[in-house]
Image (cartoon, grey):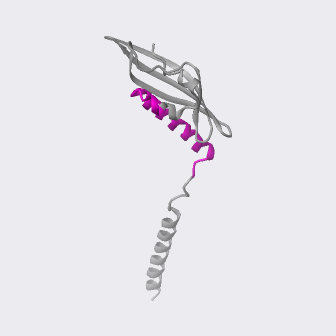
Amino acid sequence: MARRIYHYLRYLILIGITVILFNSCSKDEIKRPSPEAIIAKEAMDLLNSIKEAYMVQDEERIKQLIGSEQVLNNFSFGGEGSRLTSLEFLFRWVDVYDSKADVYVSWTGLWKKGSQEIEQKGFALFVLEGKPFKLMKILRENPFVRP
């Protein structure tokens, strides 16, 4: 009789340990991104949209994404000479303010001029303002200018 009780008690302890282990290994609480991280992602998405529009020379799309005609003067469109074949952005830092973001980007562009390929590299600061963000300034080395 004592042996049976010991046998049942052993199974109860084993089941109890199993239940505790399964409950303690459940998923952790999902971490939500901070408001600054959400704003930074919006800023990076805007710059990627501008880059993609520039790659296909969609001037109308770029006009929708920028804040003023003065900024549009920073872009080289059409014309003869060199042609952009690739443009890569590497986002380095985003400073977030109330309705403003400064995005620091290192970039690499590959241009084709006749049979010659020209690689350019630079570091740009994009100033975005408003809700939703619009590109207001391009400081330092502009990736949207033909060599």
Q: Main secondary structure of the magenta part?
A: helix
34 over 145 or under it: above or below: below
- List x then y, in percent, for residue 69: 56, 26
112 over 65 or under it: above or below: above
Which residue is at 52% across, 24% downward? Answer: 106
Name the quadrant of the C terminus. top left
Q: Is residue 136 left or right of residue 19?
A: right
143 over 98 or under it: above or below: above
How many numbered discs sit on the rendered protein? Answer: 0
Looking at the image, which is closer to me, 102 or 130?
A: 130
Residue sitting at the far right = 98
Which residue is at 47% across, 84% downward? Answer: 5
Residue sitting at the far bottom = 1
Q: Does the segment drawn in magenta span residue 144?
A: no
Looking at the image, which is closer to me, 103 or 74?
A: 74
Residue sitting at the far left = 115
Which residue is at 50% across, 38% downward? Answer: 45
Q: Does the segment drawn in magenta span residue 58?
A: yes
Name the quadrant of the N terminus. bottom left
Q: Is residue 99 left or right of residue 26?
A: right
Looking at the image, which is closer to me, 107 or 57?
A: 57
**Which segment is the magenta one?**
32-61
- List x then y, in percent, for residue 89: 48, 28
- List x then y, in percent, for residue 66: 55, 31
- List x then y, in percent, for residue 38: 57, 44
